[in-house]
Amino acid sequence: MVFSITLPNNKYGHLMPEEDAYLVKSNIFCVADGITRDPTSSADFGEISIEQALKNYPNPSGAKIAAELFCNEFTELASKGKAVKESFIFANKAISELNKKYIKKADYLANDFYACVASGGIIQDKKLHWGQICDCGIIVFDKKGTVKFQTNNGMIPFLEYISGKEGRWSDPERRKLIRSQFRNNPKQVAGGEVVSYGALTGEKEAEFFMEFGKIDLETGDLVVFYTDGFENLLNEVSFFQALYQEDETIAKQKFLEIDKIWSQKNYEKFGHERTLIATIVREN
């Protein structure tokens, strides 16, 4: 069983384009989350509603372009025998070329780099070769629903650090500071810990924030690649129960039922744009 899905933002999905992407190619899997763009109308949108700001949201969005480019490049390279790490690095270089074409000079606001974050992997001979950056992740459950492995959320150190600093995201100077000084900047250190985060902007510094590894799998394991919109749902028992199905159609039906319950119950935790790929490991 291989099940994949993207669900739009519950509140604002009708006002802005989808910016997640995913791709499955045989035993190669990847998801990518395009980094939200600024509206083109107002640098400071703190005094207007989200609905007003989104009237001038770029469509098509460079975030979606970057996310789709990553998925296409990653799966193409991996299918030709490239390792996961090499495929990530080359896909980031492809995003660099994309930005050379569309972003002549980044201002970290409306003319910020086209970018995404992502996770992906290759399942071969009962082994998962994986890679990820920032808050896209991978989780592996055994056949009883116990978590065997999960990647770290690379956004957490930055979020914990910045939460103690004054400022509002709607302020353009705040956004510019974060994007220029904390994104892909391994020199941003506080208390001996790197408090910045990585993103696939095409910048070489993004490689510092990429994580890679290999884990052994067993028959019956459930492997899930996800964007951050699904991260909170992973902890609910109903998540595994819905997805652990032999039939993709049944998995979709059950999963949409539980997603609807949780996303309507708490929009902030469960209702943002979200994407996953789930697959059950079978005998070779």
Image (cartoon, rainbow, N blue to C red):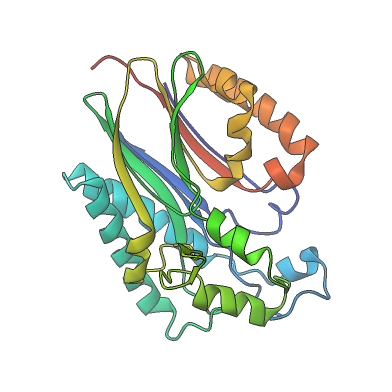
User: Which residue appears at 58% of the width and 68% of the height?
Assistant: 37
Q: Nearer the viewer, residue 160 or 271?
A: 160
Question: How far from the left and from the top, in percent, is residue 136?
Answer: 48, 48
Residue, far left: 81
User: Which residue appears at 69% of the width and 81% of the height?
Assistant: 43
Question: How far from the left and from the top, in percent, is residue 130?
Answer: 32, 41
Question: How far from the left and from the top, in percent, is residue 157?
Answer: 54, 57
Asked whether, in this view, residue 133 is left or right of residue 175, the answer is left
Dividing the picture into quadrants, the one containing residue 224 is top left
Report whether residue 216 is seen.
yes
Q: Nearer the viewer, residue 123 or 183?
A: 183
User: Which residue appears at 43% of the width and 72% of the height?
Assistant: 185
Question: How far from the left and from the top, in percent, is residue 12?
Answer: 73, 54
User: Which residue appears at 46% of the width and 13% of the height?
Assistant: 246
Dividing the picture into quadrants, the one containing residue 59 is bottom right
Q: Nearer the viewer, residue 216 or 257?
A: 216
